[in-house]
């Protein structure tokens, strides 16, 4: 007569354990994909004193790579509240950045202030 509640308890405990295992398994697979180098979602070329394309849209978690095809050095300084700064990107050099929060990231070249671009990071679907 006493066994039924005990069996019920173990049944629930087992269920909870399986649910926990399933949850942690799901978390593991997510984090393991995050350990891989991020895939480049978009590439922007710097040429003739311009960012090409000037505006791009990516999904949150995506990475963008800037490649300097120009003969001069350029950099990327992001407009507040973003504090990203690439530092000088020499000719044939590149710089990449992963965007982990959705939002609009406007930037300009600190050496040539008329060079502007923006990255629009969409939230995950
Ligand atoms: Cu520049």
Image (cartoon, grey):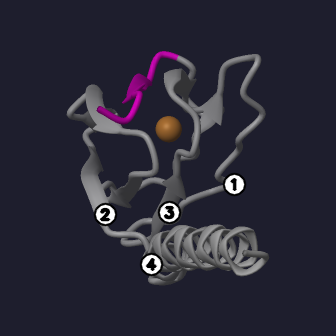
State how far apart marks 1 and 4 are (Cα).
34 Å
Q: Secondary structure at mark 2?
A: strand
Circle 4 residue: 29
State how far apart marks 2 and 4 are (Cα).
20 Å
Pointer 1 or 3: first along the chain: 1
Circle 3 residue: 95
The residue at the far left in this view is 53
In what quadrant of the picture does the C terminus appear?
A: top left
Residue 62 percent location from the top left of the image:
39, 52
User: Residue 94 or 55: which is nearer the viewer?
Assistant: 55
Side of 35 where 17 appears, left or right: right
Q: Is mark 4 within 8 Å of ligand 1?
A: no
Pointer 2 or 4: first along the chain: 4
Circle 2 residue: 40
Nearest to viewer (mark 2 / mark 1): 2
Q: Residue at x 27, y 30 (%)?
A: 57
Pointer 4 or 3: first along the chain: 4
Q: Secondary structure at mark 1?
A: loop
Tell me if mark 2 has few (under 14), some (14-19) or many (20+) residues whose alpha carbon lies within 10 angstroms of its own. some
Numbered range of the magenta stretch: 114-125
Q: Residue at x 47, y 16 (%)?
A: 114
């Amino acid at each position: 007569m006493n066994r039924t509640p005990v069996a019920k308890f173990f049944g629930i405990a087992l269920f909870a354990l399986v649910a926990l295992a399933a949850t942690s398994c799901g978390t593991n697979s997510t984090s393991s994909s995050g350990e891989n180098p991020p895939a480049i979602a978009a590439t922007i070329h710097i040429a003739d004193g311009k960012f090409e394309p000037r505006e791009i849209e990516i999904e949150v978690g995506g990475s963008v790579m800037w490649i300097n095809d120009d003969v001069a050095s350029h950099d990327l300084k992001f407009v507040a509240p973003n504090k990203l700064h690439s530092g000088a990107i020499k000719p044939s050099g590149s710089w990449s950045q992963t965007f982990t929060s959705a939002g609009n990231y406007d930037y300009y070249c600190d050496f040539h202030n008329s060079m502007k671009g923006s990255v629009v990071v969409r939230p995950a679907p």
